[in-house]
Amino acid sequence: MFDLALLLSPAFWFSIRWNPLQPNTAILMAVAFGLLAAVGALLPRIVARGRQIPKFERKAWAGVGRPAVAAGVMGMFFTFCAYQQVAILSARFWFLLVAVAFIAAEARAIRTLVQETPRLKDDAATRAAAAKYLPGKNA
């Protein structure tokens, strides 16, 4: 059985020399990271399908998908390096770094989507209402 206390040990994450990946594990990790990248790339298109979404909201959804693509591609790269036993690039802390960066970027993108997008939508409505009273641009 796998000891979960091992995951909390710094020696586990920051060891340069670790057991090589088994082929099944490497394939599973590569598929998981590939799916993460594919979902991140397709997320803005799936959300916008069949709906008229304002430009700033599309950009916000793209901001949610971009970190997933980056984490997926980096994860596949580090999985390849771990499988091939490249000395420094096969360390587990790279996966930890990718996971922390992914979570931080997703939190920022979701905060932007939830907090700033409604504000931008209100600002656009205010500008559109004011624009009909201004000469020249809407004539």
Image (spheres, rainbow, N blue to C red):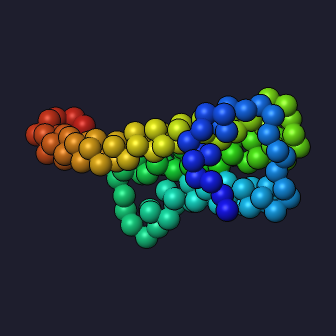
Which of these two is toward me, 58 or 136? 58
Q: Is residue 54 positioned above or below 132 on the image?
A: below
Which residue reaches farthest right?
A: 84
Question: What residue is rendered at 24% in x and 48% in y?
Answer: 118
Q: Is residue 95 visible?
A: yes
Q: Position of residue 122 (x, y in %)?
A: 19, 45
Quarter of the N terminus within the rendering: bottom right
Q: Is residue 121 visible?
A: no
Question: What residue is rendered at 77% in x and 31% in y?
Answer: 16
Quarter of the C terminus within the rendering: top left
Q: How many marks?
A: 0
* Residue 32 falls left or right of residue 27: left
Which of these two is toward me, 123 or 41? 41
Which of these two is toward me, 110 or 61? 110
Which of these two is toward me, 88 or 36? 88
* Residue 22 falls left or right of residue 34: right
Q: Quadrant of residue 88?
A: top right
Q: Quadrant of residue 47?
A: bottom left
Q: Position of residue 105 (x, y in %)?
A: 47, 39
